[in-house]
Amino acid sequence: QVQLVESGGGLVQAGGSLRLSCAAAGRTFSRYGMGWFRQAQGKEREFVAAISWSGGMTYYADSVKGRFTTSRDNAKNTVYLQMNSLKPEDTAVYYCAADRSSVLTRDEAGYDYWGQGTQVTVSS
């Protein structure tokens, strides 16, 4: 079992930056692939980024590629999402998720544990 808690969301102007953190409780965190998803109001949840258990491989949605970077610190049981050049269309609740099989997938069905989400709002 892994418990995930996101933090770092907030209100930022377009062009600004935020760094989200996802802290995990559980001894096997370092074995899990991690993903970031987001859900804008009235829309389906969508994939944002994923990172392998070692941090050696990452995968991004086209909409955030070049602007967002995910990383992890297994010693701190934490995964990060650095978001730069934010746009109003990035406004959403952001979720982190853990994948026991660490297959680096964009399919949310492949994730076993989810955080509660953190709100990111980008003003124009």
Image: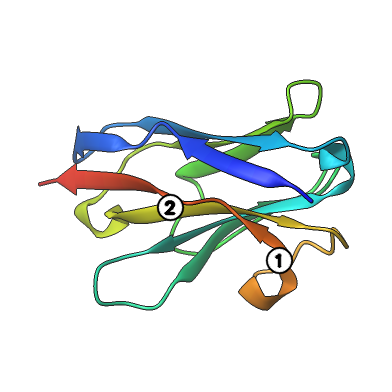
- At x 19%, y 41%, the residue is 14
Quadrant location of residue 38? Answer: bottom left
Q: Tag 2's secondary structure? A: strand
Q: Position of residue 10 (x, y in %)?
A: 27, 35
Residue 70 seen in this snapshot: yes
Q: Position of residue 33 (x, y in %)?
A: 79, 52
Residue furthest to the front in view is 1
Q: Position of residue 48 (x, y in %)?
A: 52, 59
Q: Are marks 2 and 1 in contact (CB under 8 Å)?
A: no
Residue furthest to the top in view is 75
Would residue 84 be found to the left or right of residue 95 on screen?
Answer: left
Would residue 43 be found to the left or right of residue 71 on screen?
Answer: left
Residue 107 seen in this snapshot: no
Q: Which residue is mark 1?
A: 111
> Is the residue 13 above or below the residue 109 in the image?
above
Q: Nearer the viewer, residue 11 or 82?
A: 11
Q: How is the image coloured?
A: rainbow
Q: CA distance from mark 2 to mark 1?
A: 15 Å
**Residue type, mark 1 in image:** Tyr
- At x 73%, y 22%, the residue is 76
Q: Nearer the viewer, residue 103 or 118?
A: 118
Q: Which residue is mark 2?
A: 94
- At x 25%, y 59%, the residue is 89
Marking on residue 28:
none
Mark 1, residues whose alpha carbon is within 10 Å: few (<14), some, or many (≥20)? many
> Is the residue 19 above or below the residue 54 in the image?
above
